[in-house]
């Protein structure tokens, strides 16, 4: 469900498989290789909601829609934690976007927050389908703020699957093979030290 929600900004559903190799139900587990483009729409999200079953369906849908409205449309924090003075005094830390080209020619980006202490190792944040969940400007606490408070320089990878980087031909393996190394190389070009990069999945 969370994966559907992440792509609700898309207007249409496009599923194109250029190549599909699906192994049999072999207990050894043959590798599956899918290539193509997948975009999920609001219609697909609604279809998923309609087909849900269970007693808590309406409560879940209500909480989900309220969360979408608050976080992505109104961009206001949770009322029970909201303190206007604290939000003004403690504005979200500024960041910079670094664009980089991978070995296969795809342009990706990484958002960087500089840590206040240079002694801490940098942290590269990766996530499979909801990278923005680490970075929540409307909330008083999130993972990026926590890492910065501890003095860590924080990098948030925006790989080829991110909505800012539409790609027509990719595989999940391309993120590990090209995007993550390009991001680490981008960092090491700036800092000249690749031994202390930590990854959090």
Image: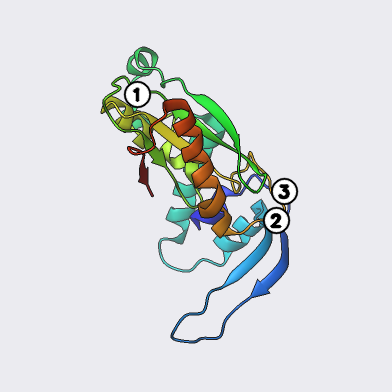
Decide: few, some or many residues near mark 1? Use Cα within 10 Å; few <14, some 14-19, many ≥20: some
**Residue toward you, 62 or 5:** 5
Does residue 91 appear to the left or right of 6 in the view shown?
Answer: left
Residue 139 versus residue 166 in the image, above or below? above
Q: Do residues under tags 3 and 1 come within 8 Å of each other at their CB atoms? A: no
Distance from Cα at disc 3 to Cα at disc 1 = 38 Å
Q: Mark 3 points at which residue?
A: 11
Q: Position of residue 118 (x, y in %)?
A: 30, 22
Query: On residue 190, which mark appears?
Result: none
Q: Mark 3 vs mark 2: which is more N-terminal?
A: 3
- Callout 2: SS: loop
Residue 124 figure quarter: top left
Q: Distance between the residues labelled 3 and 2?
A: 19 Å
Judging by the rendered image, the residue that carries numbered circle 2 is 169
Q: Is mark 3 on a helix, strand or loop?
A: loop
* Residue wearing tag 1: 115
Can residue 66 be seen?
A: no
Give the mark nearest the N terminus, 3 or 1.
Answer: 3
Q: Nearer the observer, disc 3 or disc 2?
A: 2
Q: Position of 110 compared to 143: left or right? A: right
Front residue of 67/153: it is 153
Distance from disc 1 to disc 2, alpha carbons, whole Å, reads 35 Å
Q: Is residue 169 visible?
A: yes
**In the image, what residue occupies the spot 57% across and 62% down?**
48
């Amino acid at each position: 469900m969370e994966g559907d929600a992440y792509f609700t900004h898309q207007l249409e559903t496009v599923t194109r498989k250029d190549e599909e190799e699906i192994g049999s139900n072999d207990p050894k587990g043959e590798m599956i290789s899918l290539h193509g483009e997948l975009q999920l729409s609001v219609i697909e999200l609604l279809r998923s909601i309609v087909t849900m079953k269970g007693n808590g369906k309406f409560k879940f849908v209500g909480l989900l829609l309220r969360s979408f409205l608050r976080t992505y449309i109104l961009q206001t924090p949770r009322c029970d934690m909201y303190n206007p003075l604290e939000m003004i005094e403690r504005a979200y830390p500024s960041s910079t976007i670094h664009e980089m080209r991978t070995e296969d020619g795809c342009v990706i980006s990484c958002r960087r927050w500089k840590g206040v202490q240079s002694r801490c190792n940098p942290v590269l944040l990766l996530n499979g389908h909801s990278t923005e969940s680490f970075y929540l400007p409307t909330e008083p606490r999130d993972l990026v703020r926590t890492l910065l408070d501890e003095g860590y320089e924080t990098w948030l990878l925006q790989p080829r699957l991110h909505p800012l980087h539409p790609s027509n031909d990719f595989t999940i393996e391309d993120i590990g093979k090209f995007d993550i190394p390009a991001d680490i190389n981008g960092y090491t070009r700036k800092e000249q030290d690749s031994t202390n990069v930590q990854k959090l999945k």
